[in-house]
Amino acid sequence: MFKVVLLLALVALATAFSAERVNSFENRLGNDVYSAHPCNFNEDCGIHDFVRVGAASKDAAHTFTVWTRQNNFAAACPSMLMEVSDPASPKYGQHLTFEQIHELTYDAEALNAVHNFLTSHGIPEEARFEAPNGEYVVVTAPVELVERMFNTEMHTFNSVERESSLTRSEHYTMPAALSGLVHLVTGLNDFPMTALKTSVNRVKVTTKRQFGAGVVPNTIFKLYNMPNETDATPKADIALFESLGQSFSPSDLQQFQTAYNIPQQKVAKIIGPNSPSDCSTNPNNCAEANLDVQYAMALAQGAPMTYWSIPGQGDIFMEFIQEVAKDPSPPQVYSISYGGPESLNPHSSMTGFNNELCKLGLRGITMFVASGDDGVAGSQARGNPSMCGFNPDYPASCPYITSVGATMGPEIQKPEEVCQSDAGSIITTGSGFSAFFTQPSYQSAAVANWFATGKNIPPKSMFATGGRAYPDVSALGNAYNVVIGGQTYQLSGTSAACPVFAGMVTLINGDREVRGKSPLGFLNPLLYSIKYHAYNDITSGENNCAAGQGNPVCCQYGFTASKGWDAASGLGSLDFPVFAQETV
């Protein structure tokens, strides 16, 4: 048996925050100038190893995406989303169609301005793609022309770790012809602020004995009182977001399903790159993807699975949401096991991503994101106590996703508690308060109660008490048995908990659709309105340590699990049949 720590893509930041609040990055400098984070050109982000090697070739083709204002729909979307997502609303479950979104967001004035601008610079129509609902226009043009249009200089960056290169600028200026009509241009100065996974390592015998058999599907079924059954209808489907070179192996999936008595089922649809042979070459190439596929399909048996892979040369979340936005019939549920420091992501990109999440929620789509694997500090604290502090994770901090934390204990016959690297795991569940997104109304009462009654709350000056708090919920996330390259490894992370929770909700969607009901859609208003008896309240554990094995860095402060919602475990894990009864 082998073991790997499956870490949620957070690596060292450039600045230490041992006793200070982390601020988010405002990339708009005024006068319509948008800047990349300085760390990308100073080569000290820590999250990636891209190094500038020189000016980009002037005649090289470059692709970028122009995002329109969409009739300023971002201002109206939040209230509309609550109307269809709040169980107390008379419009609950009345999601919008793709065509209805078109009526609300298709901005003819903005799109005409974009196309006129491109035409004035000699860019032919065949070099453009306009999204069906007009959210954006994808453009391919020579670097020299891109530089002229956006008053910028493009540079070539190389990454040894990722074995790739990209073309980016330090800043760009929004052309006067587009000012006020376009809110963002991606592909010019956005960098991949998400790290590759750590390596898969063999485990010493003592560690193997500590976790014993580890987590298998039946462990989850028993813990959360789940029936080992198939989805009620194939109309309820699920998708997994993957990136950064990850691949899954169909043969590993078949072996996993045979070993753990899961009905044989293939991935229904693969979007983007996938190289199954990479799993045998290096298990780290498939650790994340195989984990996601094997356990999501074990939980949501019979549900059609879409494997959605993004190459990830820039902002992987904007690249992903760009693809989903143009799909007239995307999957109902998504699981995302990737993230990075909120402080390194520009305001404009985070705002754009969150706005698109809001629109997807209106369409009845549910998004889950893993909350991180390094407690409150992030992985900058691994091996470096001076980096302790509160560093929220993105996109776990977005208001329109459901953030999933990790628990441990039942895999070694102990009660469920917060996953902690100093208590037997090699990861610590991530949580925090966003320094950018304000706290949404759906969770304000729960958070206020925690501030009033919670245990060992750190000094409030150290984190953004009025920010979006996460995680929302938790699930088992320690020592999962995963087949990679024909061998079994143990993996741990909130990136294990996330697809499991997504699979549970997919099952409920199937039951709802059999009864003629809509999918659950944006889940959070429902989660916070359900009585606590639907959850397994997690009241033990603290997330003050970074990930690590043997002697992890443990900081002075973290969040402690307590009764009700808390900033370490959220609302807790699910008592599945009770939760299903409340939601079906």
Image (cartoon, rainbow, N blue to C red):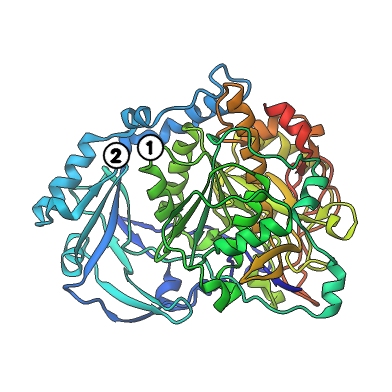
Question: Label 2: which residue?
Answer: 132
**Which corner quadrant holds the N terminus?**
bottom right
Q: Is residue 109 left or right of residue 402?
A: left
Please tell me which residue lies in front, 521 or 57: 521
Give x and y (percent) for residue 500: 67, 49
Please tell me which residue lies in front, 209 or 316: 209
Question: Label 1: which residue?
Answer: 328
The kind of secondary structure element at disc 2 is: loop
- Residue lying at 57% horizontally and 75% vertically, measured from the top left: 280
Residue with the most extreme top position: 90
Measured in 3D between alpha carbons, the distance from the residue under mark 2 to the one under mark 1, in whole angstroms, is 9 Å
Q: Quadrant of residue 5?
A: bottom right
User: Crowding at label 2, few (<14), some or many (≥20) Cα neighbours within 10 Å?
Assistant: some
Q: Is residue 428 left or right of residue 152?
A: right
Instruction: Tell me if label 2 and label 1 are in contact, CB under 8 Å.
Output: yes
Task: Name above or below for residue 37 compared with residue 399.
Answer: below
Number of labelled discs? 2
Please tell me which residue lies in front, 232 or 413: 232
